[in-house]
Image: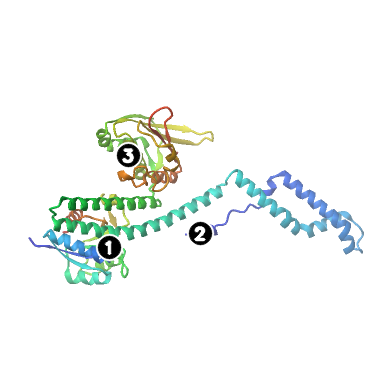
Amino acid sequence: MESPECKQRPSLKFQVFNSPLYILWIIVLAVFFSELAVIFVVNLLTPYLRPDPFLHSILLLVFLFPALYFFIYQPLKFYHSQLKEAQNPSENDAELQKTLQEQKMKEIEVLANSVAHEVRNPLAIILQGIEYLKEKLKPEDKNVGLILEYIVDAIRRADNVIVGLLEFAHFSKFDMAPSDLNSLMEKTLSFMQIDFDRHRIRVTRDLKGDLPLVKMDKKKMEQVFVNILLNAVQAMPDGGTLNVKTRLKDSREGKRAVIIQIEDTGIGIPKESLDRIFKLFFTTKRERGSSGLGLAISSQIMRTHGGGIAIENRVGLPGVRVTLTLPI
Amino acid sequence: MDKKKILIIDDEEAFTRMIKLNLEATGLYEVSEENRGTQGVAAAKAVCPDLILLDIIMPDLDGMMVARNLKDDPATKDIPVVFLTVVVQKKETEGSSSIIGGYPFIAKPVNTQELIDCLGKYIK
């Protein structure tokens, strides 16, 4: 893969001439230097020539062109590009950022594969060892059996972290195709109906009809929905209501996006945790086996789709509102 | 009932030993183990197992090369091979598309029952 550091930005040549102010400045400087030259230099160098200020100005302009180029045009060009980048990051920068992001993801993938190899192999040995011991010990002391179960459970939890890391890392494997978002949401909701029933959660749907097809990886998007819905279920242990809405939104710039809103009536998110919920391995539910990867992965998936995810506590109401944005 | 012969090729000696112990404890299988790819190829010819469990990442000859060698040899080309791998997610092994390079695979760590189910599925 080409190193992004080696990737040349498109030339900004002549960009400086976009500004009348710069052009004027260059002309003024050129005339000034030319006049100086005519007065002090050309007459000394060419005493045999008949004084002709116009001719001398032209000659001096030619002589001074390199100086003008390096001492005026180049710094101006640099200043102009810096100013432009600061005000409005160019498409080139976006492309560079994308390339850097892709390279970072490749590195994470290599790292995740290495971690998986180094951790899962020992886990596999421990798991097989526990199974052997369970069979052989047949313990009188029930605590022995219980401890072995605890160890197996711990192995599964550690393995889940590796699974999450692999999922997070394998973002190069996206299978994008135009898909019906509403039917995917319906499929996910029906798939999770058992969880809703178990926790006495009522689901209301407000899915906009005739949504245009959205280009996405259906499996990854389903993973995002499941992550969010599972969080909502865990936030409502004593039951509640889950509202799912889809909308079409036109931005001021004329861009269209599908908005998916998932609201619960659960316990909400502590204010001090809101800033960190998308961070890798951050969780407030460690004791319940959460790996802290779900939202980090969801956020990454949404970004890869060119969209985004926002989570906020509902104002004046219990629970959380998750808003997913997917460009069309 | 004849015991099914399984050959496991994996560079983790402790893992192959555990698999051997657990599978043989069921009374259904006779397990041979090898911890190097090259030795695994030779053992496949000698043992002629009903199925080979094959690790992918091994120091001398990786799983893909071992599988290719087995496929190229008339004596071993029909032996079913199941890859054991750490770099897949569990759910990837559940669908019908759990194939690497044309071979089925199973994710580590695996418990004995999952392994027995897998063996039952692929032993001819």
Q: Residue at x 54, y 58 (%)?
A: A5
The residue mark sitting in front, 2 or 3, is 3
Tell which subunit mark 3 falls on.
A
Whether B39 is drawn above or below A279: the answer is below
Task: Determine the secondary structure under disc 2.
Answer: loop
Front-most of residues A94 and A120: A120
Callout 3 amino acid: Leu
Callout 2 amino acid: Ser
Q: Give me the disc on residue A230.
A: 3
Provide residue B72's location: percent of width, then percent of height: 26, 68
Residue A78 in the figure: left or right of residue B107? right
Q: Report which residue position mark 1 lands on.
A: B55
Q: Report which residue position mark 2 lands on.
A: A3
Tell which subunit mark 2 falls on.
A
Which of the two labelled residues, at mark 2 and mark 3, occupies the earlier sequence position?
Answer: 2
Asked whether residue A254 is in view, the answer is yes
Report which quarter residue A196 is drawn in. top left
Question: Gap between marks 1 and 3, in whole Å?
Answer: 34 Å
Q: Residues within 10 Å of mark 2 (few under 14, many from 20)?
A: few
Work out which residue is located at the far left of the displayed protein and give it. B1
Front-most of residues A83 and A54: A83
